[in-house]
Image (cartoon, coloured by chain):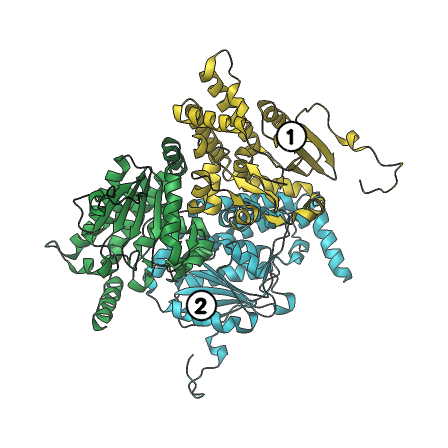
Chain colours: A cyan, B green, C yellow
Amino acid sequence: SSSDSSSQVKPEADKKQAGYETLVITSEDHITKIMLNRPAKKNALTTQMYREIMLALEAASKDDSTITVFTGNGDYYSSGNDLTNFTDIPPGGIEEKAKNSAILLRDFVGCFIDFPKPLVAVVNGPAVGISVTILGLFDLVYASDRATFHTPFSHLGQTPEGCSSYTFPKIMGPAKAVEMLIFGKKLTAGEACAQGLVTEVFPDSTFQKEVWTRLKAYSELPQNAMHISKQIIRNHEKEKLHAVNAEESSILQERWLSDECMNAVMDFLSRKAKL
Amino acid sequence: SSSDSSSQVKPEADKKQAGYETLVITSEDHITKIMLNRPAKKNALTTQMYREIMLALEAASKDDSTITVFTGNGDYYSSGNDLTNFTDIPPGGIEEKAKNSAILLRDFVGCFIDFPKPLVAVVNGPAVGISVTILGLFDLVYASDRATFHTPFSHLGQTPEGCSSYTFPKIMGPAKAVEMLIFGKKLTAGEACAQGLVTEVFPDSTFQKEVWTRLKAYSELPQNAMHISKQIIRNHEKEKLHAVNAEESSILQERWLSDECMNAVMDFLSRKAKL
Amino acid sequence: SSSDSSSQVKPEADKKQAGYETLVITSEDHITKIMLNRPAKKNALTTQMYREIMLALEAASKDDSTITVFTGNGDYYSSGNDLTNFTDIPPGGIEEKAKNSAILLRDFVGCFIDFPKPLVAVVNGPAVGISVTILGLFDLVYASDRATFHTPFSHLGQTPEGCSSYTFPKIMGPAKAVEMLIFGKKLTAGEACAQGLVTEVFPDSTFQKEVWTRLKAYSELPQNAMHISKQIIRNHEKEKLHAVNAEESSILQERWLSDECMNAVMDFLSRKAKL
């Protein structure tokens, strides 16, 4: 709110939408903001968070907002998949776990592919894994100069998701995309911007102020024109994106059951436990 | 002409092709140059100009030139659609106006999609709207450092044309393309070059000299090889481009009849009238 | 080998694979290296070399290596097609020559399209013609700052191959791709990197050391994950790439029989002979 009168200021909590445990969702100035809210865990994505994000996107697609913004609370944007997801095995065993995880992944990414309004990432800090790969499905990506972009799939015996096997080579060419997606090269914000993954980089000290001023101005433009433009741009490849998403998810389902992947994930978790 | 002998110099007028009111068209050195010639109106594109450009492209495709060049007379490359086009309503009313305009737009852009020879834009100054969006259909884009690239569609309640909803995300990635096409961000020549929309930027003081020296050298290369190369490169997506063009034009036909668009255009014209 | 003990060091020759006259092929550290070995001819590609490279790729696809690397011996990466290929006319005359050459070209490029492991170019010096165009089919391209990238097809009355008519516009946008592919603009390593054709540029003095250190580290990552990732990324467009390759090869078959092309090649060879 732009008011300085304390009597008119609603407490921030009143703008928050109830019903989410892992997200803070606020709507004002024609902007719906979805904030990942597990700062103590670097906003690592749990199964619950996947489901809450899907609900939040469904709601945002139908509310009266013009644009929808993702950001992270705390130092990180998101450290990617919470690898403890791998250790919670259902009665059906690891085959059922892998199958359920692949379905969840496909449905989650599908929500981003189909989202009908301009989708903005405000990348406040390091981004890892699926929080990076789905950026190819966003319409604007603003990054703090503290942000980094890291997809260490091969290190964990895994393969790309979030349609990145298609969107990244298209955005930056295979010679840049492969070093990220296959060899796990971590990009700085400046590198990610030069390669087209990021729209613009801002100094961290002024990041929030500059980005939200700009987004507020953008959100006041004619709404229908913007929503239709977004849909024209994405409809050209929506069918292709869904096919890519299904293929990537299906390949990961097999990967998760491979010795190579299991050993790499166990190594990672045991190294982390020793720290 | 490279001759210094005044007795051999033909007056410039002799090289000009007759029959065009809004363009100046000249052919020499295997180059056909189509110059937008409404400098007092910043080369804003009227309905007449659309038709003359289509005729000029048809003629250039059949003449003995090797390459075809677009440029603007005066300070501007082109300020885009002349919005007074909107105020000239035929007897059939605004529905007929919108329908005719969509057909004209689709046919106009179709001429660029199908043009069989290398097509060069010499962007001498600011470019706006459709003069920017069709640059994705050009083969070389040289820009003066005075040039800017601006597509304020949402501001006018409108949506992208010229196949830009397809070509711009392909050229620069969605994170850069959307800020231009949906949020109307104006690019400098340097930014447009970094993002692949522009081939090279030149200082304005030497722009004409450097560009025409280079184009003259290029125009002397084997003609058939160049024409066939152009066609190989574009044929890969010609069908897709025509489909995109048809869809963009059809969506604009609806947009033009919407209250959102009419109000935005009327606001713009009345603000302009007050200046 | 990392051993300093002279008694354990195998002579370099022992790692070399036998049976190749124009290539030196070595395998260690999970890397198979294919080195073009006609340094006195700037690694110009003869018909024999095309065939040996196809055999080497076939072998590398089946060996136990993780990644496959191309590089050149001496000052050049490769000066492209050896134009003396044009002067070796079979009994069937130039029509048969053109037909055979087009089949060889198509099969050669097809091997790169189908190669199942990460493919790396270590571009040690100038690259010309087909050694440049097939870079769009590589997964990493590291370049010395001595490298340049040059495709003077039109100058020789010819048209693009190696799928470059499709991959280059996709990687760098048509405005940059056309200046290379149609007008023969030579890029520096820095320009090629800015335009996404090259992954990273290194100072020539430290090029080999930096690149091989990095590649050795990459080659130790989980192998199956990397091979599957490579295949996901390329399978999205494998069918399209084979169609483009067939079309480019077929058009070149006609080109090679044209007066325009024959005259341009003869001019080039006679100018070269006079030097």
Question: With A160 as the anchor, is B76 left or right in this view?
Answer: left
Rendered-image quadrant of the N terminus of chain B: top left
**Chain of the residue where label 1 is placed in the rendered structure:** C
| Of residues B40 and A179, the one drawn nearer to the viewer in this rendering | B40
Is residue A136 among the parts visible in the rendering?
A: yes
Q: Secondary structure at mark 1?
A: helix
Is residue B237 among the parts visible in the rendering?
A: no
**Chain of the residue where label 2 is placed in the rendered structure:** A
- Kindly identify the amino acid type of the residue bearing the numbered disc 2: Thr
Question: With B238 as the anchor, is C96 left or right in this view?
Answer: right
Give x and y (percent) for residue C236: 51, 40
- Kindly identify the amino acid type of the residue bearing the numbered disc 1: Ala
Question: With B153 as the anchor, is A70 left or right in this view?
Answer: right
Proximity of marks 1 and 2: CB atoms separated by less than 8 Å? no
Say which quarter of the image contains residue C46.
top right
| Of residues C14 and B189, the one drawn nearer to the viewer in this rendering | B189
| Residue ID at (63%, 40%) | C227
Q: Nearer the viewer, mark 1 or mark 2?
A: 1
Q: CA distance from mark 1 to mark 2?
A: 65 Å
Q: How many marks?
A: 2
User: Which numbered tag is attached to residue A32?
Assistant: 2
Q: Within 10 Å of the Cα at label 2, are there few (<14), some (14-19), or many (20+) other Cα atoms? A: many
| Residue ID at (44%, 68%) | A32
Per the image, the residue denoted by label 1 is C40
| Residue ID at (34%, 46%) | B244
| Of residues C73 and B266, the one drawn nearer to the viewer in this rendering | C73
Q: Within 10 Å of the Cα at label 1, are there few (<14), some (14-19), or many (20+) other Cα atoms? A: few
Question: Is residue B17 shown above or below B256?
Answer: above
Rendered-image quadrant of the C terminus of chain B: bottom left
